[in-house]
Amino acid sequence: MKPALPLLAPALLLLATHAAAGPDDDLLRATRLAASCNPCHALHDHGTAGRKAPAARPDSAWLQERLLAYREQRHPATLMHQVAVAYSREELELIARHWAQSRR
Amino acid sequence: MTARRHFLLACLAAGCAPWVRGESMARPHVLVVGGGFGGATAARFLREWSAGAVKVTLVERNRELVSCPLSNRVLSGDARLDSLRFGYGGLRHAGIDVLHQDVVALDPGARELRLADGRHLAGDRILLAPGIDFQWEAIPALADPDRRGQVLHAWKAGAQTLELARRIAALRDGGVLAISIPRPPFRCPPGPYERVSLIADYFRRRKPRCKLLVADANAEVIAKPDLFRQAWRELYPGIVEYLPEHGLEDIDLARGELRTQLGPLRADLLNVIPPQRAGDLALAAGMPLAGGAWVEIDWLTHEAKGLPGIHVIGDAVAAVPGMPKSAHLANQQAKRAAAAILDMLAGRSPQPAPLLANTCYSFVSADDAVHVAAMFRYSDATRRVEQVAGAGGLSVARSAHEGRLALDWARGLWHEALGPPGARRAKAGA
């Protein structure tokens, strides 16, 4: 059985995202780039591995600063610094904006 | 292609979802064969990223996925196999047609599959996730399929995992277990050493006079050597005996002996991890195989070399230098292949994410884990994926903190492949 609602729901969600960001290549690029951050972050809407998501939505400035800190080995981590260094600054900024917009 | 279908696909690739009420359109159809971590994740992302505009059929022989990640913990009594068994309800819920059938023939030209029940399926594109099978011909004593059950590999989680756990539990205190490790490439390079560590921890706690002989075909532990060696030295002195360059030549089933390059090893219980190659499906489909074993692909589209429209992901792929065969990389390849397929269905040039991450967490005791990470990036210049120099790395030390992260990482893999916990539950008694 294919329930109609769960099928439609992602469509509506995408339409909503689309209205906010424009159906441009940036959205597509951001969605796909951010998917490389999972599975580690698949469970945690706010990108927190091994911890519960914070109650407040992290804004894109906070995310950008944290990701760049990992990239530049300025923030203590077991693993995240080893991952972040493979992305360009521009890629991390794109992902941070995307996360802040699309995650509730 | 009709103009309307073209519009649908162009829109789909742009990330928007046309939903034209009351109009029926011929939806593009992707056939996915193999419902492991690669295939199941690809099927789900094909649906999610097309907002249901692409029809997806998954053909998988088994009714359940049994997670290899964490399955070594079953051997040491630290996890129950039931906690690693999952159903495909989450995929059905996402609108994917799941067929539990064997594929008996694949026609790459016509992009058609024939199933064991006689059905034919045709798709616009086919994605294969064949996983691995074993090179039994390398072990003469096990060439006859009827004899294979006598020596367990437990390298595909499931019935063999349970049986090996049972035999380990039945071993008398003072008994000897020998594990044979092949040369790479094989699925999950740190897996054998994690297995050694967890069983050693079980012996330490429950049967301290037991011994573990590690007959490795390699000259040194091939993944995270310092972290594993340190754990064995500090936690299991006198229990683990590591024997490099002890490649397996044959098995003496009657005497319970491994015949290795450097002489025979007798043990009360044998666990032989055989050498590996791409899954039978890849061989049956006449794929181009590197070294007769692994499928050569185009790293932009994930299509098999010379077979347009046939995409291949996961352990079966001929990896680039530094790239292991892991559930994590199957997950990453699944999403790149899904993106490329959606672009190509829409008539656009494929633009999957350039980056792939890999992490393998391994337990070195019941609670403590370590990780190895590596990053890969697609290069337009070489048209291949290459390991990113200066990225990735190892744990500084084993820790219970990383043990918790390891459990989380596995849950993330399950979630992306099979959906949320409620939806992925295996049927009781199945």
Image (cartoon, rainbow, N blue to C red):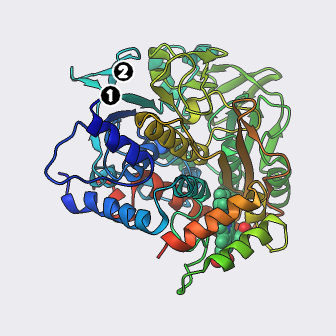
* Quadrant hosting residue B154: top right
Q: Give the residue at x 45% y 25%.
A: B309
Identify the residue at horizontal 46%, vertical 57% (top origin). Answer: A23
Q: Secondary structure at mark 1?
A: loop
In the picture as drawn, the residue positioned furthest to the front comes out as B3
Q: Are marks 1 and 2 in contact (CB under 8 Å)?
A: yes
| Amino acid type shown at disc 2 | Arg
Q: Position of residue B121 (x, y in %)?
A: 27, 25
Task: Please state which amino acid type lies under the numbered disc 1.
Answer: Gly
Q: Give the left or right position of residue B214, taking residue A24 as reference.
A: right
- The circle on residue B123 is 1
Are marks 1 and 2 in one subunit? yes
Q: Is residue B104 visible?
A: yes
Task: Identify whether A99 is placed above or below B246.
Answer: below
The residue lying at 17 percent from left, 43 percent from top is: B24
Q: Which residue is mark 2?
A: B111
Query: Where A79 falls versus B161 (above or below)?
Result: below
Residues packed near mark 1 inside 10 Å, few (<14), some (14 to 19) or many (20 plus): some
